[in-house]
Amino acid sequence: MRIGYPCINRSLDCQGDRTFRLKSYSEGRLVEVVGNNLACLERMLRYNIGHGIGFLRVSSDVVPFASHPVCAFDWQAHFQAPLRRLGRLIRRHRLRISMHPDQFTLINSPDAGIFARSHAELRYHADLLDGLGLGLDAKIQIHVGGVYGERDAAIGRFIERYARIDERVRRRLVIENDERCYPLADCLRIHAATGVPVLFDVFHHAILGDGTTVGAALAQVAPTWRPADGLPMLDYSSQKPGARPGMHAEHLDRADFQRFLQASRPHDFDVMLEIKDKERSALAALDAARRDPRLVCPVPQPPRRPESAGKERS
DNA sequence: TCTGGTCAAGGTGGT
DNA sequence: ACCACCTTGACCAGA
């Protein structure tokens, strides 16, 4: 079990998801922002290594407009060296990486144009993970999509479209149960038809589920991940007190997290904390899990010769 | 320099 | 048909 947080580290004075307006798109601007985002990603990775955080969701905004027609720039070639370097850092410390394209990525839309744009967006995510040189355990998680008034047809369309997606996307793609449209049971049904692994969202399941316990749900989800996919990934959050059901908490609810750790035994997985205060909750979760035999932390920084110690950080 | 309206993309659910 | 919400900060035009 590794523990992680999504996209942003609030303790650092850098943002790895900086973007700009489409209207002000230029190659110069793109290069500047991507350079910034990669530098900040490196700082997040080093922070995580230093703090025992083994799992990170990389922001979809690392390369703004990457899947938009306006972007004709070969960013993969231009940033090949830094991408490779970050990838080596990730692999050396056995960090787990995921990405989560946003809600506009809908492969089951009846609109062929929306599917095409979503496919392009997924290719970008795969390009970034490939560019980092990461193994197939680095996943891209999406939701099933919309219902469009006909669930069965919408699920059928997902299955059809999945077969048409590029292999280099498909081998990284996983689907996640959501809190409005598609509960775990639907995801498992889609898995049975396609083989796509199912990423279990504990909080969504509590809102839109059939009452299956966490333990029983994990027993169903675990076999959907093949060995090459790595450990199953999970999303965990808890309810923001007093807010509309479904709102993510500001801080880790330690007691709830410990109940989750208890209930999830003996299954092993990597858990992503979808909680607003990001790395602070990850640190609290690490502390809450410190006696859990499943917990693994990044391999500590190997000792370095003094003259090379400063180089990689510059 | 400051401020607030606005930002690529879609779908759901309420009125 | 239309709007708020999801989620979120920060970009950037205009004062």
Image (tube, coloured by chain):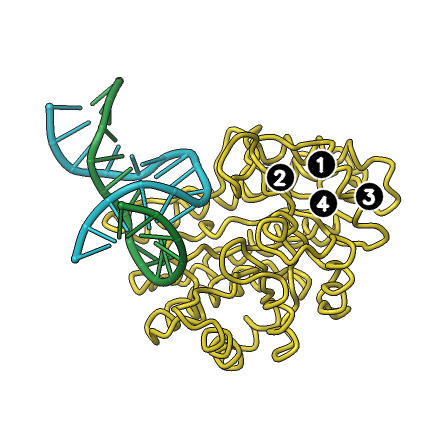
Chain colours: A yellow, B green, C cyan
Q: Amino acid at mark 4?
A: Gly
Q: Amino acid at mark 2?
A: Ser
Labels in figure, total: 4
Q: Amino acid at mark 1?
A: Asp
Q: Earlier in the sequence, mark 4 or mark 1?
A: 4
* Helix, strand or loop for disc 4: loop
Q: Name the residue located 33 percent from the left edge and 73 percent from the top edge.
A: A111
Q: Nearer the viewer, residue A239 or A222?
A: A239
> Is disc 3 in contact with disc 4, using a CB cutoff of under 8 Å?
no
Per the image, the residue denoted by label 2 is A238
Q: Residue A230 in the image: state x and y as whole percent.
A: 74, 62
> Is disc 4 in contact with disc 2, using a CB cutoff of under 8 Å?
no
Per the image, the residue denoted by label 4 is A54
State the separation of the CA atoms marked 4 and 2: 21 Å
A177 sits left or right of A14 in the view: right
Per the image, the residue denoted by label 3 is A262
> Is disc 1 in contact with disc 3, using a CB cutoff of under 8 Å?
no
Q: Amino acid at mark 3?
A: Gln
Q: Nearer the viewer, residue A198 or A102?
A: A198
Per the image, the residue denoted by label 1 is A256
* Helix, strand or loop for disc 1: helix
Badge 2 and badge 3 both on one subunit: yes
State the separation of the CA atoms marked 1 and 3: 10 Å
Mark 4 vs mark 2: in front:
2
Q: Residue A24 in the image: state x and y as whole percent.
A: 25, 47
Q: Name the residue located 51 percent from the left edge and 65 percent from the top edge.
A: A144
